Amino acid sequence: MTFESVIGLEVHAQLKTRTKIFCGCSTAFGAPPNQHTCPVCLGMPGVLPVLNRQVVEYTLRMALATHCEIAPFSRFARKNYFYPDLPKGYQISQYELPISRNGHVDITLDGTTRRIGINRIHMEEDAGKLNHDPDRPVSLVDFNRTGVPLIEIVSEPDLRSPEEAGAYLRKLRAILRYLDICDGNMEEGSFRCDANVSIRPQGSTELGTRTELKNLNSFRFVEKALHYEISRQKELTADGGQVIQETRLWDADRNRSTSMRGKEEAHDYRYFPDPDLLPLSIDEAWVSRVRSELPELPDEKRDRYREAFGLSDYDADMLTGSREVAEYFEACLGHFMAPKAAANWIMGELMGLLKAGGMTIDQSPVSPQHLAQLLKLLDEGVISGKIAKTVFEETARTGTPPATIIEAQGLVQVSDSAAIETVVAQVLDDFPDEVAAYRGGKTKLIGFFVGQVMKATQGKANPKLANQILRKQLDA
Ligand SMILES: [Zn+2]
């Protein structure tokens, strides 16, 4: 029997507001422990939370960008549990009446596009953080993160492979970053993911018993952990065993998941509406205003690149997958309009350079303006493609504009026929055997001759012209 895997993801994204969701404390990351706290986020008795309007605004952006329905009336609820990083003894979240439901995002994998349903997006507050002392049997609690605003994005169980889960997460993160509401940093915990995984016989529509995977704090771990869990469930089932409903923790060091708690220990959170917070009413005017202010999102941008610039699906996808890359590309076009050349250079030379240096595109040593200048000189035939690569490397190393390097080093391409004819004559003199072979039918040797001409001119000969002149003299 063949099985298919069924995956649903719960993503927590930290919103980039200046202050927390229910008090005025700062959300800045990296402060000394317990500096960003007040009686409200410390859960003192008698204090009252006040909802941060910006949190609602940002949540609306994400909900509308993912085609969710907005509830005109939603409510905050208390999720009750005890843990030392939760001073109130409950987390304020949304439960039976979330702010938005029934959305979707489209993911593209190997040229196939699939629509992944979003069950709901709701707002909630983050808990604090426990720091376990490695030397003493003590844990210290830091409440700076308590009350930092989160949105939880719950997918439908529509994902069928770890790779689809990865594509879905990358798409969500790209949208959040295009909307400028979350920095998407998995390592710092501002974009976190839990996964529900089950398997079922191919063709079945019923859901199998699922396990929940926690602690997936990088894109690579998500896919690895899902592969591991799917194989584990398949092997268990093949051996006549049964998957039990449980929460499992991914151990990245040992490349396996271990059981954390079973169903019998599953929490009953005793949700109830928070009496300290009024229900949230959102009128049509607010929704329309946020909708009208949405920026161009990855899918729209990809379609526009394809149609307006004639880029391939792959190129358009790669350039729009990250907001910063798209911005770099557009800045480059602002200086010189050559979309295909810019796309090729950004995805080839520039990405290679950034990867080798462990840099992001924001840290690129070659500015969009300099790349545009290089592309223009290449387009005008001032330099050859080969020289362009050398100049690009030098600009990257020194920050000098390409035009300055070309002028200072005399790298201007030789497009003077008489000069190239002289070099061609010399090359044909130097390689009589190859000339004879060429004339005897081995016409593929043209590449060899062009190479020799380029070598003799230190790469400065116009290769097209060199090719023409060589053919003329060889075929004569
Ligand atoms: Zn506070």
Image (cartoon, rainbow, N blue to C red):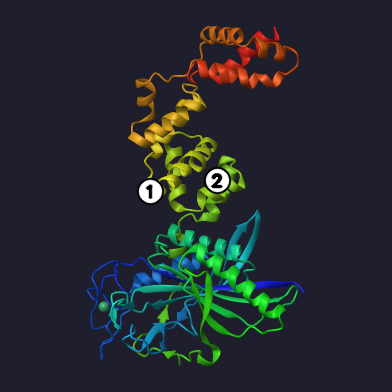
As drawn, 189 above or below 371: below
Question: What amino acid does circle 1 point to?
Answer: Asp
Q: Which mark is residue 305?
A: 2
Residue drawn at the location 28% of the way across and 66% of the way down: 30
Neighbourhood count class around disc 2 (C-alpha, 10 Å): few under 14, some 14–19, many 20 upward:
many
Disc 2/disc 1 C-alpha distance (Å): 21 Å
User: 260 or 137, which is in the foreground?
Assistant: 137
Q: Nearer the viewer, residue 178 or 231?
A: 231
- Residue at the spot 51% in from the left edge and 89% down from the top edge: 266
Left or right relative to 42: residue 436: right
Identify the element where label 2 is drawn.
helix
Q: Which residue is mark 1?
A: 362
Is the CB of mark 1 within 8 Å of ligand 1? Answer: no
Q: Nearer the viewer, residue 426 or 397?
A: 426
Vertical comparison of 374 with 254: above or below = above
Ligand 1: image quarter: bottom left
Residue 288 position in % (x across, y down): 46, 66
Q: How many marks?
A: 2
Dot placed on the residue nearer the N-terminal end, 2 or 1: 2
Left or right of residue 336, residue 111 in this image? right
The quadrant of the image that shows the N terminus is bottom right
Q: Residue furthest right?
A: 1
Q: Secondary structure at mark 1?
A: helix
Q: How crowded is the residue under tag 1: few (<14 C-alpha within 10 Å), some, or many (20+)?
A: few
